[in-house]
Image: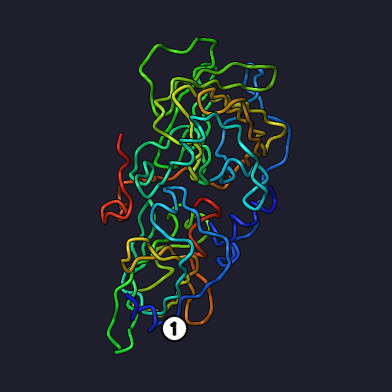
Amino acid sequence: MNSGIRAAGLLALIAVALPAIAHHSFSAEFNDKTTITLTGAVTKVEWFNPHIWVYLDVKDAEGKPQHWQCEGGAPNTLVRNGWTKNSLKQGEEITIDGYLAKDGSKTCNARKVTLADGKNVFAGSSAPTAK
Amino acid sequence: MRNTSLLSCLLLAGCIASGQPAYKPPSGPTPRTASGKVDFSGVWQKPYAPDMTKVGGADSKPMELPFTEWGLGEWKSYHPEDGDYTGACLPFGLSRSINTPEPMQIVQTEKYFTLLFEQNNWYTVVPIDGRKHREIDPTWFGDSVGRWEGDTLVIDTVNFNGKTRLDTIGHPHSDQLHYIQRYSRPDLGHITWEVTIDDPKTYTKPWKNTRTFTLRTDWEMMEYSCEENNKSLWEGRIKIPKQ
C-alpha cells in the first residue's frame, strides 16, 4: 500500500470538514487523521445504495497498477443533484482526495473526485462531523 | 441553519459542481385538511444532524448533555469500530431516521400520520385519533401516538428496545427513552420541528433540538436498499454489534 501512496505523490494533510455518512459511522471504517490523494484510471463505478464505489488503478513507483476502491455518497442524493452513473467513465483519469480505511486495505472514503480537466464530480460523499 | 445548508450542499450533494439551480420552496399559507387540521403532507428535506449536541449546525459549539452516570458510561464506552448497527443495515430507529439527510414523506389522514423515510425505506405509522400506547414488546422505532395541541401535532413515542443510538456520532439512550416530537407548519413551505429527549436513565433532565424542514415539490421518494452493495460489511471493515 505504501508504494501506491508514494507513487501518487500523496498523503496530504488537509484540514477539511470530515465527510460524514448517514448510513454508518465514519469512524467505524475510516480514519479522519489519515488523508490520501490518489491519481489513476477508473476501472469501474458501482452505482448502488448505500454508497457508490469508484475503483481505480494507481501506478506504483515501478509503474505497476495498484487496485484501489473508494466509497462515495448515496446514489439517491447524487441523482437529486444532477449526477448519474455515467458521470464518471471507465478509463477516465481522476484524482481522489479522501480518507484511508482503518483496516490497512487499499480502501478510501472519497471527499473529492476531480477529473483531469479540474472539474469535480460527485463533490464528496456527505456532510461533516459524525466521527 | 443557513451555514449548515450550504455546507451540506457542497459536501453532500455537489450542487454547485453539477450546476443545479438553488431550490426555493413554494410560498403560501399553511395548508389544512377538509376537517381544518394542519396538513403536513409532502416530501420534506431535513437537515442532516449527525451530532445532536450541535444544534446550530455542524460548525456550532456543542451543547453539554446532562448525562447520568450510566449515560456517561455508555457514551464513553461507545466505539463504532467494534460494532455499528446502521452500518450493518439494522434499523436506524426513530431518532437516527429523522436525523438522516435523505428526505422523508409525510402521509396524513384523519386517523394516521405516517413518516416514510427514504433512508433504508423504513417507515413509522402514528395513530392520531386519540388512542393510547399499545402494550407490545419493545421495538427499534418504539410505539408512537399523536395528539393535537392547537395547530401543533405532538407525537409521543415510548417502548424502544434500547439497541439504537440517538445520532450518527453515537449519543446514547436507554429503553426508557421518551421521544417527543412537535410538528408545526408556519407556512406552505416549512415545518418547524422540535424534539424533546426525555430519558431518565441516560440524562438527568430532558433536552431539545429544533430544526426546520423544507417542502421539496421537486422531489419524489426513491428506493434505498441498504443491503444491495454494503461492501464495508461484507469485507469486514464494519462489524455487526453484539446484542
Q: For mark 1, does the 10 Å Cα neighbourhood hold few (<14), some (14 to 19), or many (20 or more) residues?
A: some
Answer with the quarter of the image where residue A75 lies. bottom left
Q: Position of residue A19 (x, y in %)?
A: 51, 58
Q: Nearer the viewer, residue A54 or A27?
A: A27
Q: Position of residue B66 (x, y in %)?
A: 61, 32
For disc 1, the marked residue is A9
Amino acid type, label 1 = Gly
Tell me if residue B121 comes above or below residue B146 in the rendering. below
Image point 48% across, 62% down: which residue?
A83
Q: Position of residue B51 (x, y in %)?
A: 56, 44
Instruction: Determine whether, in the image, residue A70 is placed left or right of residue A117.
Output: left
Instruction: Determine whether, in the image, residue A63 is placed left or right of residue A112.
Output: left
Q: Quadrant of the N terminus of chain A?
A: bottom left
Instruction: Determine whether, in the image, residue B229 is placed left or right of residue B117.
Output: left
Image point 29% across, 89% down: which residue?
A62
Element class at badge 1: loop
Image point 51% across, 17% down: which residue?
B145
Tell me if residue B49 comes above or below residue B133 in the rendering. below
